[in-house]
Amino acid sequence: MSLPLILFFVLAVMAVAGAVVLILAREPIHSALALVMVMVSLAILYLLLGAEFIAAVQIIVYAGAVMVLFVFVIMLLNAGTEDRTHISKIATWVGLPLGFFLLLEVAHIFWHGRMSAAMGSGAGAPFEPASTHDLSMALFQQYLFPFEATSILILIALLGALVLAKKDE
Amino acid sequence: MEFAQEFINQHAILVVSLIKIAVLLFIVMTALAYLTWFERKVIARIQSRWGPYYVGAHGLLQPLADGLKFLFKEDFTPPMVDRLLYILAPFLALSLALTAIALIPFGPPTGPYSHLFGQPIFIIANSSIGLLVLFAITSLGVYGVALAGWSSNSKYALMGGLRSSAQMISYEVSLTISVVGVLLLAGTLNFNGIIESQAGYYLHFIPRWHVIPQVVGFMCYLTAAVAETNRIPFDLPEAETELVSGFHTEYSSFKFAMFFMAEYANMITVSSLATILFFGGWLSPFPDTWTWQNYLPGVGLVLLGVYLAFDTVANMHGIARLQLAVVTMLCLVGGAACLIPPVAAAIQGPFWFTTKVLLFLFFYVWMRGTLPRFRYDQLMAFGWKLLLPVSLANLVITAFVIILPLLMGHQ
């Protein structure tokens, strides 16, 4: 096995294990840290795919900012241990079959080797990671309007949260 | 022998990286230890005291004694702590702080003696987006502090951890925005690229460092960097008069030492970053035509050796005299070695880089000896209401100045 393949499996196991711990942990802060582990593993997976910029941004934004806020709020509220409840009815009757179906779907795609088809025609072409320069050219020229529209959407959401959180006087 | 040669040729990047990591770790660990000595000596000078004096000549063996003390003290884990996170936190803090140093270039990527088996020796990981990766690593550093505060199950530690997280999140925004101006000027995220974009001189002798057009950005960076590393006047997380010592109150022995080392390693990282972004990294401040500058490190060391020799004879007695004599010999021999022309040319880059970083570290200590601590609400107001708008304005003005000639050219 080559080094990237070994790394891929280690990181994949780490990401999945983190996701499982995130759900099963009873301490909220352990859940938050498990999510950080998922984010970091994903970032290194991006790095393996040659997407340096996305990997760095993934860590800076998600692990370094969003999750720090999560941890901060958990610490601030001093959230206690959560109680275990019985599994909900919806999860049993809808969630489990849906999950099973999804797994089946993924297995089907792998089985028939459709991965290369699903990823477009890039399978045969020589692999060339996009540089930060290419990315910014695409983002600020070709897709400038959707980019700006998304920014404004986020700004509106931010203002909305601020208005909702503001005390009535 | 032939086999070894072949192995090195095939795995040059692996072998050289491991050697570089080992050497750099040794140097950085020693530097961290002697940084504490440097800080105590300078603070003592500011406060008209002697500082460490008894362990070794001029207290030169004090860091060694402190290290041994940390190793042999009882490593006490308080009851009722979250054991996993309590142990994880110091490891996280120190390993992230040390990893960040891997991205720093200490010398030029080209030139005599800059390669070993075809691999550059002055940088461990030369990433094309070095700056972003560095910010990614340092942005995780807050977890060490926050988790230490939370897992200790102590009110002081929790308050310290909370303050620290809030402070680090707030100032990270300004820190990142203040360096974007430099990125606009340099046009690259690679550290060596940023440094090379500062080559050249105004009026043939003033170096074209980014600090001149970006002086506002530099001020913002410096302020935010001090806040990021939790140093005076921004050391609210460990304000000893209110919080005992903040997030590491409950830590003892070597786990405490790890937080301590992480703080100093972070100081080195942000000082290196300031040097790279604003002060030309490993570039010399003098024009290339002034060839005498190659002999500066050697002459400096020899002069230091001569002074120390005088000091040894005049002021030292007993074993201290012997210890200082050894240091004197090291200085003289090292200085003489640096005067050999090929060596003198090869160490130019690392010499200027280290000198600039040392000046920043001195500035850190100087501030600690001079300034009082902020109040918490002042700290937050300063970060959000002054520092952030100023760095944003700096960014907008820089972008406008860069784009203006392009706009004029098109019409």
Image (tube, coloured by chain):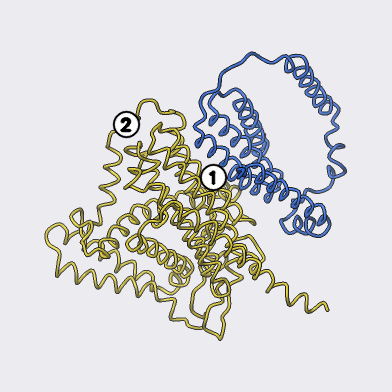
Chain colours: A blue, B yellow
Q: Can residue B2 be seen in this view?
A: no
* Secondary structure of residue under mark 2: loop
> Contact, CB < 8 Å: mark 2 with mark 1?
no
Q: Is residue B396 visible?
A: yes
Viewer-side residue, B202 vs A140: A140
Label 2 crowding class (10 Å Cα cut-off): few <14, some 14-19, many 20+?
few
Q: In which quarter of the image is residue A73?
A: top right
Viewer-side residue, A32 vs B14: A32
Screen quadrant of the C terminus of chain B = bottom right
Residue B392 on image: x %, y %? 61, 63
Q: Which chain carries label 2?
A: B
Look at the picture and state if B276 lies above or below A161.
Answer: below
Q: Residue at x 65, y 46 (%)?
A: A162
Q: Name the residue under label 1.
A: B140
Q: In the rendered view, does B391 fall on the left or right side of B362?
A: right
Disc with the residue nearer the chain's start (2 vs 1): 2
* Secondary structure of residue under mark 1: helix
Residue A153 on image: x %, y %? 76, 48
Q: Which chain carries label 1?
A: B
Q: In the rendered view, does B304 fall on the left or right side of A98?
A: left
Residue A104 on image: x %, y %? 81, 21
> Which amino acid is tagged 2?
Phe
Name the disc covering residue B76, or none: 2
